[in-house]
Amino acid sequence: MEANQEMLIYGAEWMERDGDGVRLIVSHCDSCGSSWFPKRGVCPKCFSGNLVEKPLSEEGEIYSFTRLHVTSKRFKPPLVIAYVDFPEDVRVCGQVEGEPVEIGSKVEIVFGQIRTEPDGRPVYSYKFRVKPKEAGHQ
């Protein structure tokens, strides 16, 4: 990427970046205790506007995933997409990198390239990286 070219970021309003790290931001309802991603203006559960922005936990667990071997030219196959559950009772969809990708795998949120624009420019956003399994755990 040329020095004067602006970085293309998808979903910048949903995250806070710190160097190479990234934290996703949820809307937390102080009225009913629910959290939502992406951020909302009104709580979909109780319709309260009493929402505050909070960072999502850094680690989640894969709930479900699919592996695409045929994609558009904008993506590099194989492309793994997963729903990831977080302790805040929030489920987020995103790309996954690393192996093994399994239901129940622990993942961390990272910042990286998710696709390429037709003109060749890379697009960046949050994605998930599989965490290594701890010794002694299957």
Image: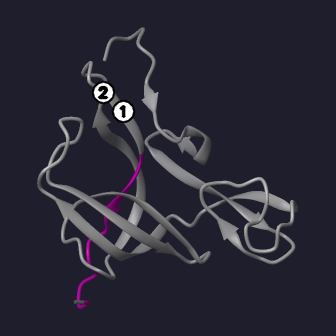
The tag earlier along the polypeptide, 1 or 2, is: 2
Compared with 120, 14 (above or below) is below
70 with respect to 86 (left or right): left
Amino acid type indicated by mark 1: Val
Which residue is identified by label 1? 123
Q: Is residue 61 magenta?
A: no
Asked which secondary structure carries label 2, the reply is loop
Look at the image and give the residue range highlighted in magenta. 126-137
Q: How many marks?
A: 2
Compared with 135, 22 (above or below) is above
Residues at discs 1 and 2 in contact (Cβ within 8 Å): yes
Which residue is identified by label 2? 117
32 with respect to 107 (left or right): right
Numbered circle sitting on residue 47:
none
Compared with 56, 63 (above or below) is below
Asked which secondary structure carries label 1, the reply is strand
Query: At 68% from the left edge and 69% from the top edge, which residue is drawn?
Result: 35
Which quadrant does the N terminus fall into? top left
Q: Position of residue 118 (x, y in %)?
A: 26, 24
57 with respect to 28 (left or right): left
Amino acid type indicated by mark 2: Glu
Q: Position of residue 30 (x, y in %)?
A: 84, 70
